[in-house]
Image (tube, grey):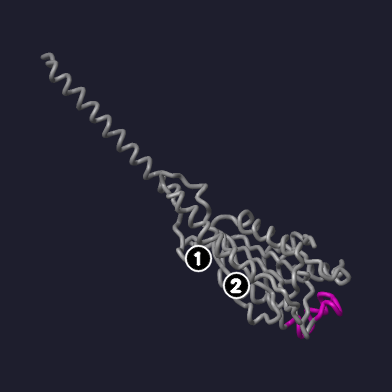
């Protein structure tokens, strides 16, 4: 076999190096494509920020504004709301915020409804614009929710507190409008003293059987099957907010398929 000349050997080495570079480049491209395919998101709706495949879960916050909050209560609500928005609701989950006012027909729709898009902490700079994701989280998620905080409080006492009617609206305008297989949570900030002409828990706390048999109970019926309920209790009238009141609400939510997992008295 004839020996290769020095020039031929050098050319052969160049071809080998060039071939190895091509192989390495192809491997890098394949790796990046594979990473993007395995780590890409489903995409999201630019308006609601929800995954195009649908929200992964649903968190509803219902705030009772039928009584003015004390300074301490308002501070506690602000802390609760911030923690709820920034830490409690997982990425890809929908947030709906409602209020209880004197006329439930004026508060039937959520103040705001939006998904947590995430800050991009779970993403890589190779596959996502992290600065843009952080700006989106702040501008399109935190800001719209924060702007509604003042709308959750009032400086005037209301004549009525239609908590049961608002629970119906929450069901109709949130859970039924956005059916999903994920977890459903309901956080209620209220003294839980429902007060309407048809039923006043200031005057009488009925047994669940008597309530369900009454015209008012039948009229306000709903189902919240599988919903986890957290009560953040505004202690506005402690003389009416004893074990009997809490017993009524525990049995009420159980009767409609939900469960109270937590009762937390709010400061103030």
Instruction: Look at the image and tell me in which quarter the N terminus lies.
Output: top left
The structure residue drawn at horizontal position 69% and vertical position 70%, both measured from the top left corner, is 153
In the image, residue 4 sits, relative to residue 265, either above or below, namely above
Instruction: Look at the image and tell me in which quarter the C terminus lies.
Output: bottom right
Where, by quadrant of the figure, is residue 116 drawn? bottom right
* Numbered mark located on residue 110 in the image: 2
Task: Find out whether the residues at labels 2 and 1 contact each other: C-beta distance under 8 Å.
Answer: no
Position of residue 237 measured from the top left corner of the image (x, y, whole percent): 84, 71
Q: Is residue 201 magenta?
A: yes
The structure residue drawn at horizontal position 65% and vertical position 56%, both measured from the top left corner, is 83
In the image, residue 24 sits, relative to residue 162, either above or below, namely above
The secondary structure type at the circle numbered 1 is: loop
Q: Is residue 195 left or right of residue 170?
A: right
Which of the two residues, 163 or 101, is positioned nearer the viewer here?
Answer: 101
Residue underneath mark 1: 48
Where, by quadrant of the figure, is residue 110 drawn? bottom right
Pointer 2 or 1: first along the chain:
1
The secondary structure type at the circle numbered 2 is: loop
In the image, residue 56 sits, relative to residue 26, either above or below, namely below
The structure residue drawn at horizontal position 45% and vertical position 53%, both measured from the top left corner, is 132
Q: Is residue 19 left or right of residue 8?
A: right
Position of residue 230 measured from the top left corner of the image (x, y, whole percent): 72, 62
Q: Start and end of the magenta stretch? A: 200-218
Q: Is residue 68 magenta?
A: no
Report how far apart the C-alphas of labels 2 and 1 lie in the structure.
Answer: 13 Å
* Numbered mark located on residue 20 in the image: none
């Amino acid at each position: 076999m004839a020996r290769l000349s020095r020039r031929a050997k050098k050319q052969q080495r160049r071809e080998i190096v060039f071939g190895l570079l091509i192989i390495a480049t192809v491997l890098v491209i394949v790796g990046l494509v594979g990473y993007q395919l395995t780590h890409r998101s489903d995409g999201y709706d630019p308006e609601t920020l929800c995954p195009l495949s649908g929200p992964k879960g649903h968190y509803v916050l219902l705030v009772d504004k039928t009584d003015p909050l004390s300074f301490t209560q308002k501070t506690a609500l602000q802390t609760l709301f911030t923690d709820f928005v920034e830490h409690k609701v997982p990425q890809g989950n929908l947030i709906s915020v409602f209020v209880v006012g004197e006329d439930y027909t004026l508060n039937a729709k959520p103040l705001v409804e939006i998904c947590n898009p995430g800050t991009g902490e779970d993403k890589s700079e190779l596959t996502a614009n992290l600065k843009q994701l952080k700006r989106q989280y702040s501008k399109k998620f935190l800001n719209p929710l924060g702007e509604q905080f003042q709308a959750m409080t009032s400086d005037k006492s209301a004549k009525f507190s239609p908590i049961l009617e608002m629970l119906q609206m929450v069901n109709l305008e949130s859970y039924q409008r956005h059916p999903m297989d994920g977890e459903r949570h309901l956080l209620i900030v209220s003294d839980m003293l429902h007060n309407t002409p048809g039923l006043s828990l200031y005057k009488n706390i009925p047994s669940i059987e008597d309530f369900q048999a009454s015209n008012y109970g039948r009229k306000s019926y709903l189902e919240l099957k599988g919903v986890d309920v957290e009560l953040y209790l505004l202690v506005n009238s402690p003389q009416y907010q004893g074990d009997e009141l809490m017993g009524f609400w525990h049995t009420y939510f159980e009767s409609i398929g939900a469960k109270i997992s937590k009762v937390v008295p709010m400061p103030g």
